[in-house]
Image (tube, helix red, strand yellow):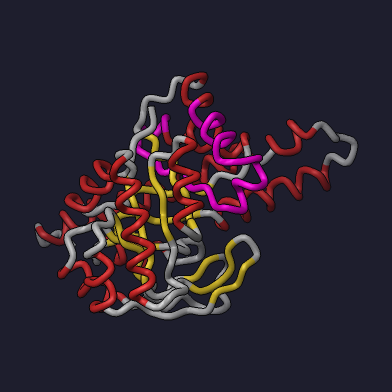
């Protein structure tokens, strides 16, 4: 059974660790992520972009794929099926009606008042269905589904205003980007901490790929409790599969080609989850003056 992200993020927020949000792009990736997270006995958020939805056939197909795998694989962990960067109320409603347990409405490209109005419409509909809602303020730069966005950092005032819509989590743009970084990441930790100090709802970090783990863990200590990963798994899978194809030119079975990247993906997932939970241990050590 799918769940919304409220309970898992509330626990992460309280105990200062982060829940992994991994974008899914096909059956194999969904299977690998579910299997590895179940082995780690850790809740997971499966993100689905509009581009992935189109590639896989539609929201209902994705819902059936995820719930079918959960049953066949005997998945015991909490799983949240989440629309990533929903562009409109209509798209969010479509995902909710198909069975998604969580949605992100990204109206950050609009002026704040319009962002708030669209977000409130989504919140009202989603909450009537027990579906959780994430929203964005400011604008995360980089690329997503081949669309490029410019960066605009969120202000505390914007965050406080958007939170009034009743959202369950907030993604404030604070220097991260989608896709690969052109240069070094430059996260605004001071503002991140300030927003966390003034808001009780969980904060989300988009564009987690390429951010050094010490910065990831500092972000968690500044209030981040959901981290989105997509490109890092794509690159990990691509590198291994490219080598496999080069070394095995006569193997053309797509199951073997795609599957050659399975273990590398699972190893990367395990490493990321370990890093996302390590911040909690670090905080406890700091509180006890161990480090």
Q: Main secondary structure of the magenta part?
A: helix
Residue 127 visible, this angle = yes
Pick the residue in front: 203 or 238. 203
Write down the region rendered in magenta.
Answer: 38-67
Residue 214 visible, this angle = no
Q: Residue at x 65, y 65 (%)?
A: 146
Residue 288 spot, x, y in % from top left: 9, 57
Residue 259 spot, x, y in % from top left: 68, 35
Q: Residue at x 43, y 25 (%)?
A: 75
Asked whether, in this view, residue 96 is left or right of residue 25, the answer is left
Q: Residue at x 60, y 46 (%)?
A: 53
Quadrant for the C terminus, please: bottom left
Pick the residue in front: 79 or 287. 79
From what the image shows, is residue 167 above or below residue 131?
A: below
- Residue 146: say if magenta: no
Asked whether, in this view, residue 130 is left or right of residue 246, the answer is left
From what the image shows, is residue 248 above or below residue 198?
A: above
Q: Residue at x 38, y 63 (%)?
A: 118
Q: Splitting the image into 4 quarters, where does residue 255 fall?
A: top right
Quadrant for the N terminus, please: top left
């Amino acid at each position: 059974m799918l769940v919304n992200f409220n309970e898992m993020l509330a626990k992460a927020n309280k105990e200062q660790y982060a829940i992994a949000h991994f974008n899914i792009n096909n059956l194999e990736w969904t299977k690998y992520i579910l299997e590895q997270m179940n082995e780690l006995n850790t809740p997971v958020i499966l993100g689905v972009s509009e581009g992935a939805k189109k590639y896989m056939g539609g929201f209902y197909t994705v819902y059936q794929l995820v719930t079918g795998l959960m049953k066949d694989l005997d998945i015991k962990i909490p799983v949240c099926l989440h629309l990533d960067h929903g562009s409109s109320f209509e798209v969010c409603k479509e995902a909710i009606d198909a069975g998604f347990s969580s949605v992100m409405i990204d109206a950050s490209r609009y002026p704040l008042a319009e962002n708030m109005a669209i977000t409130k419409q989504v919140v009202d509909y989603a909450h009537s269905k027990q579906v959780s809602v994430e929203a964005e303020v400011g604008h995360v730069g980089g690329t997503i589904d081949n669309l490029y966005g410019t960066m605009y950092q969120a202000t505390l005032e914007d965050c406080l205003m958007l939170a009034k819509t009743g959202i369950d989590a907030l993604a404030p743009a604070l220097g991260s980007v989608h896709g690969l970084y052109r240069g070094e990441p430059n996260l605004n930790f001071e503002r991140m901490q300030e927003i966390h100090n003034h808001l009780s709802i969980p904060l989300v970090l988009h564009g987690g790929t390429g951010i050094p783990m010490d910065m990831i863990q500092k972000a968690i200590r500044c209030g981040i409790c959901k981290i989105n990963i997509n490109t890092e798994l794509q690159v990990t899978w691509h590198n291994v599969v490219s080598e496999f194809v080069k070394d095995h030119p006569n193997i053309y079975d797509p199951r073997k080609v795609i599957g050659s990247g399975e273990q590398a993906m699972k190893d990367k997932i395990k490493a990321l989850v370990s890093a996302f939970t390590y911040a909690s241990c670090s905080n406890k050590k700091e509180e006890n003056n161990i480090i």
